[in-house]
Structure formats: C-alpha cells, structure tokens
Amino acid sequence: QITLKESGPTMVKPTQTLTLTCTFTGFSLSTSGVAVGWIRQPPGKALEWLALVQWDDNKPYSPSLKNRLTITKDPSKNQVVLTLTNMGPVDTATYYCAHSPVGSVGLYDYWGQGTLVTVSS
Amino acid sequence: DIVMTQSPDSLAVSLGERATINCKSSQSVLYSSNNKNYLAWYQHKPGQPPKLLIYWASARQSGVPDRFSGSGSGTDFTLTISSLQAEDAAVYYCQQYYSSPKDFGQGTKLEIK
C-alpha cells in the first residue's frame, strides 16, 4: 500500500526559504522507473506542477520556478525534500507530493493529503 | 513547454445527464514509439488531494466508476461522465506527462444543476 505525507512549516515569512519533506511508504525510490513529484495549489487557483525526482536522480523543474527550487531524494529514509527560496505571498498554497508509477514519470496515482503553507509577515 | 487548455472553465449539468470536458494541448502528446497518449485526467474536491481518473488518455484507473471515460489523441482530448451523480461535483484537470514541465490545464468546475 502506497502512502505519502507532506510535512513542514505552516507559515513562513517573506524572503524565507521553505523546506518541505515528503515521507512515503509502499515503494522505493531506488526502483527503476519510479518518481516522486511536487504540485501546489494556491487558494482558488489551479494545480501547478513544480518538480519531480526520478529513481536515477533526474530532476526536471518548472521553468518559472527553476531558480528558486531544489528537490532531493533520500531513498534510505524514504523521503523527498523540496526547498523553495525567497518565499513571497504568491507562494501561499497547498503543497502536495505524489507518486509516479513505473513507466509513467509525471503521472500521479497516489497523492499525499497536502500541506497548506501561508506566507505572511 | 506544452500548454494545456481546457474548455469550458465551468459547467452545470443535471443529475443523470452527460457531462463533457475538453482539453487541448499545444503540441501532440502522442508518443509514436508506443502509440500512447501521455494524457491524464484528475478529479479534485475541496479538502482532498486530486484523484487520478484516467491515464493514457482512455485507461480508467482502478476503482473509478465506468461512467467516467476518456477519449482523444494527439492534441485533442475529452473526459465524459455519462450519467452525472451528485458526488461528481468537483474540479477536473487534464495533465500531460509527455514532457517536462508536466503541466496541468486550468481546471473545469463541474456543478450540479
């Protein structure tokens, strides 16, 4: 059974760096073909794809956020970490991590419940 | 980057009627080597994570009712709900996973009339 759970701060101040951790069970990021991605949804807006990390450490990013985003994996801990620098009010959103099955990188069949991050001074 | 555009932005359909949502990609998401369309549909309800409904444009995810169906190829795709149920009220997104960034459409809000 695959599960994912996001953890991190619920509030950050403008210009701070956000660090979110996705802890998962039921699969290994060392398995060929597997990936974990991050997606966010600002209040009242659409889903926005952010980044993903593949089993082979390939890491595509959203072009609009590439300069601020870093994604890393720790297969030994079953974790994926996302950092977003220089946070601003527009980064207020629910952040989700999700699992991509083998052979379908970027398709998301299992999702975490999401974590709401608010940017406020 | 492949831009995903959905239509309409919102629609209201009566219970038991058919609902149709369209999705157009700015480039083909059909991979010629395996003849698969890298296109998915998700259902998103408030307070819940998105739920995968359809992948490879027309394959239904396990556990998804058969009133949900996907069709299309290349750049034009459709999600059809054949007989709308109350629990189908949600926002629906298409997504391409052909190339990065794996972007979503802007969403279509489906309401019960």
Image (spheres, coloured by chain):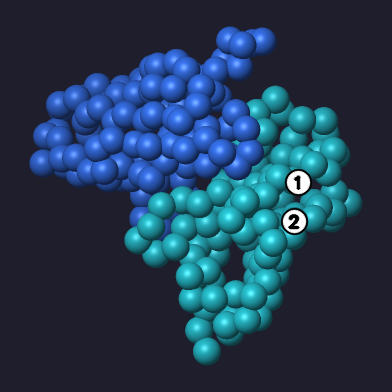
Between A28 and B38, the one lying in front of the other is: B38
Residue at image coords 65%, 80%: A16
Residue B92: x and y in percent read 36, 40
View extreme (right): residue: A76
Q: Which residue is mark 2?
A: A71
Q: Nearer the viewer, residue B76 or A112?
A: B76
Q: Colour of chain A?
A: cyan
Query: In percent of the image, x 71 and y 28: which residue is there?
Result: A102
Q: Along the horizontal axis of the image, is B56 left or right of A54?
A: left
Residue in view at x 82 percent, y 30 percent = A32
Q: Is residue A96 visible?
A: no
Q: How far is disc 1 from disc 2 in space, using C-alphas? A: 7 Å
* Residue B101 rendering spot, x and y as whole percentages: 60, 42
Residue A27: image location, x then y, percent: 75, 39
- The colour chain B appears in is blue
Name which residue type carries label 2: Ile
Query: Where's the C terminus of chain B, which quadrant?
Result: top left
Please tell me which residue lies in front, A65 or B46: A65
Q: Residue at x 85, y 38 (%)?
A: A56
Local secondary structure at mark 1: loop
On residue A59, the disc is 1
The subunit carrying tag 1 is A
Q: Quadrant of the N terminus of chain B?
A: top right
Residue B106 position (above or below residue B52): below
